[in-house]
Image (cartoon, helix red, strand yellow):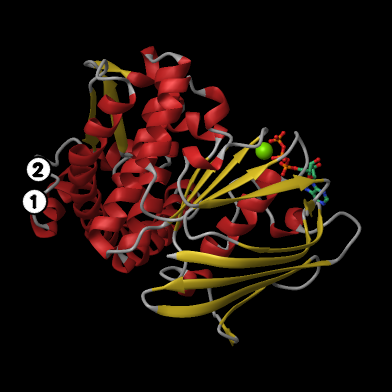
């Protein structure tokens, strides 16, 4: 997958941007607060119709303006696509692929896939399980449309069941539907666990060698998928998992009614990351945390390539500056293959990078 060109109007601090990119490495450089992250954010937006750092689309629109426009020319699966997003402060956002209006962001998936690594990704290791579930969800959704569907369904059921558990004392009739919701959540949950387990299995094959090389052979990383305690083998067929989920729900029924929240199901799953046998979340240093998080992201990119034959576009925001020389060299060696966007504060010598192009960004504009 290649993003050939990008056009922006009134996106963040860009009044207007037009750029044609290299299929290799694109270095986006400039001083702080000039628009480097904004540019990567725009590329990611064309991929997922969402931003890693904006809660609402209107944050992406330039201050004082009421609309923004993004357009990207993409080559993927031997075809050309023109992706467009029109954002408006008042109305709904509109997405287009080759001029055809898309009904939802889900239809965008599969055109331009991206893997983004940014400074906030240290949370992937440091924070609670929600961050790691999000990582798993993002990765699997890009590969398996059925998983994305199951996840949406599960979230809907979860919200509904949460309301039942919250209000049942005031409205006992709600309990009549609880069994039905439990069953459907267990069915959808079994599918989710099955997909997650298989993805983590791939991740366990691909990530440790990356991390080992990255750390100069010094550190061993291991991953473990943690799900509902009654599930003996998450890799088992969904039918087997279903029975085990139902029995877990049954044993937690009373506790759920008392706590008035869903206690049973894969919405509490985690991906445990260990370094040399110790929990990375608790014990990893700053550098180890960064290395582990980046290894996971690079692994997800390689898995995507092995599964689909296409490299997702890699967006590396501000990673190199924090790494020592050896680790920088490692990253630059490892990212050959697909198209890459790297932001940094100083101009990099391209001969370190192979084929590529540099873009100097200043004040929300390209310096020619
Ligand atoms: P750093 O090296 O510090 O990470 P950067 O080049 O990545 O800097 P960006 O995060 O891209 O900087 O932000 C550039 C500028 O864009 C910031 O000064 C920010 O205030 C501004 N900005 C953010 N959102 C908007 C918006 N909606 N309209 C106008 N400007 C905005
Ligand atoms: Mg930045």
Describe residue 265's horizontal placement relative to residue 284 as left or right. Answer: left
Label 1 element class: loop
In this picture, is 90 found above or below 340?
below
Q: Which of 130 and 181 is in front in this view?
A: 130
Q: Give the percent coordinates (x, y) of residue 225.
A: 23, 37
Image-quadrant location for residue 91: bottom right
Q: Which of 299 and 138 is in front in this view?
A: 299
Q: Which residue lies furthest to the front in this view?
A: 351
Q: Distance between the residues labelled 1 and 2?
A: 5 Å
Q: Give the percent coordinates (x, y) of residue 134.
A: 42, 45
Q: Give the percent coordinates (x, y) of residue 30.
A: 72, 39
Is residue 257 in view? no
In this picture, is 164 found above or below 275?
below
Q: Which mark is residue 236?
A: 1
Q: Which of 136 and 325 is in front in this view?
A: 325
CB contact under 8 Å: marks 1 and 2:
yes
Q: Which mark is residue 233?
A: 2
């Amino acid at each position: 997958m290649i993003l050939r060109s990008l056009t922006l109007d009134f996106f963040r601090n860009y009044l207007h941007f037009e750029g044609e990119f290299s299929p290799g490495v694109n270095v986006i450089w400039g001083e702080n607060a000039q628009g480097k992250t904004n540019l990567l954010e725009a590329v990611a937006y064309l991929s997922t119709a969402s931003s890693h750092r904006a809660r609402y689309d209107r944050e992406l629109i330039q201050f004082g303006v009421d609309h923004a426009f993004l357009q990207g020319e993409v080559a993927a699966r031997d075809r050309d696509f023109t992706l467009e997003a029109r954002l408006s402060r008042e109305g709904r956002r509109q997405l287009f692929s080759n001029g055809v209006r898309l009904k939802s962001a889900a239809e965008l998936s599969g055109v331009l896939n991206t893997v983004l690594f940014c400074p906030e990704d240290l949370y992937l290791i440091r924070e609670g399980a929600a961050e790691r579930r999000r990582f798993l969800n993002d990765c699997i959704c890009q590969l398996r449309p059925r998983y994305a569907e199951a996840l949406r369904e599960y979230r809907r059921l979860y919200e509904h069941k949460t309301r039942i558990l919250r209000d049942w004392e005031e409205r006992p009739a709600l309990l009549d539907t609880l069994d039905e919701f439990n069953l459907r959540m267990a069915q959808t949950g079994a599918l989710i666990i099955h997909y997650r387990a298989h993805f983590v299995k791939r991740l366990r094959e691909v990530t440790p060698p990356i991390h080992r090389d990255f750390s100069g052979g010094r550190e061993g990383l291991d991953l473990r998928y943690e799900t509902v305690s009654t599930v003996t083998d998450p890799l088992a067929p969904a039918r087997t998992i279903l029975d085990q989920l139902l029995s877990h729900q049954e044993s937690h029924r009373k506790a759920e009614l008392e706590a008035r929240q869903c206690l049973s199901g894969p919405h509490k799953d985690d991906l445990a990351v260990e370094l040399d046998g110790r929990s990375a979340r608790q014990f990893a240093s700053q550098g180890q945390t960064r290395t582990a998080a980046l290894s996971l992201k690079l692994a997800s990119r390689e898995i995507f390539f092995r599964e689909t034959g296409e490299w997702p576009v890699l967006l590396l925001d501000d990673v190199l500056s924090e790494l020592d020389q050896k680790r920088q060299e490692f990253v630059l060696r490892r990212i050959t293959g697909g198209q890459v966007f790297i932001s940094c504060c100083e101009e990099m010598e391209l001969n370190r990078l192979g084929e590529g192009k540099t873009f100097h960004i200043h004040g929300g504009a390209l310096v020619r």
